[in-house]
Image (cartoon, rainbow, N blue to C red):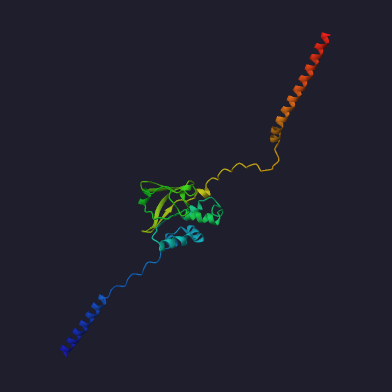
Amino acid sequence: MKNHIVFMCTFALITILLQVRTISAQPAAAPAPAGPTNITKILEKAGQFSTLIRLLKSTQVGDQINTQLNNSNQGLTLFAPPDNAFSNLKSGTLNGLTDQEKVELIQFHVVPTFLSVSNFQTVSNPLRTQAGNANNGQFPLNVTTGGNQVNITTGVVDTTIANTIYTDNMLAVYQIDKVLLPLDIFGPPAPAAAPKPQKGSAPTSKDKSADASPSDDDSSDAMGRACHGVLSFFVAAIILALSL
């Protein structure tokens, strides 16, 4: 009986060891694949970017960023002003923009290439943004570095990169201290051209005076000649009378 109990215990132990070995030999479950890059979710996780998120959605620039990141190998860089940067704008600045100007404002914060912090030291100015070509003076964005500081100027505002919110091999998101205001929208207006005279318009008093001047001169010359003729006639008459 004792040997039977020992045999059963040994058999049970061997069975348990075999099961443990089988379980441990099974491959571990693969981690869940990462979801597609979503710029608004990145900003939501960082916090304090509700105004920028709202503008990314209303202008559909956020969708354009996500589509480009998830369907191409072309990287992007986003300069992200926080809520207090928008609050520091002059009252009515955003409400005074047209829908197209709002699109251009947000696109002005997007560089269509991936820029690491070290890239700012060698990048060529002006940077090209999604708002348009910077070389025509409409959307210039210039970057300079000093030590670890990255300075950005638009011709309207100057700001710096405060910190890095997110970065990988495709997308870099940097927090900046101010909203980047493009020169084309917020710069001083171009001087108005002088109006051209309309065809068939009535001449001004100055024009009339200028037109009348030649005729006045002609009248004076005619009167002078007439007076000289009369004077010559009287002189000739006097000489003739004295000679008789």
Q: Percent from the top left, x then y, of residue 45?
A: 42, 61
- Residue furthest top as drawn: 243
Front position in the image: 167 or 130: 130
Tell me if 17 is positioned left or right of 32 in this view: left
Quadrant in the picture for the N terminus: bottom left
Quadrant in the picture for the C terminus: top right
Q: Percent from the top left, x then y, of residue 214?
A: 70, 30
- Residue furthest front as drawn: 244
Q: Is residue 239 visible?
A: yes
The residue at the point 22 percent across, 83 percent down is 15
Front position in the image: 13 or 49: 49
Q: Percent from the top left, x then y, of residue 215?
A: 72, 30
Determine the image quadrant of residue 234: top right
Q: Percent from the top left, x then y, of residue 116?
A: 37, 54
Figure label count: 0
Image vertical order of residue 206 relative to residue 29, above or below: above
Q: Is residue 44 visible?
A: no
Tell me if 97 is positioned left or right of 125 in this view: right
Determine the image quadrant of residue 73: bottom left
- Residue furthest left as drawn: 3
Image vertical order of residue 28 relative to residue 143, above or below: below
The residue at the point 81 percent across, 11 percent down is 240
Front position in the image: 177 or 55: 55
- Residue furthest bottom as drawn: 1
The residue at the point 19 percent across, 87 percent down is 8
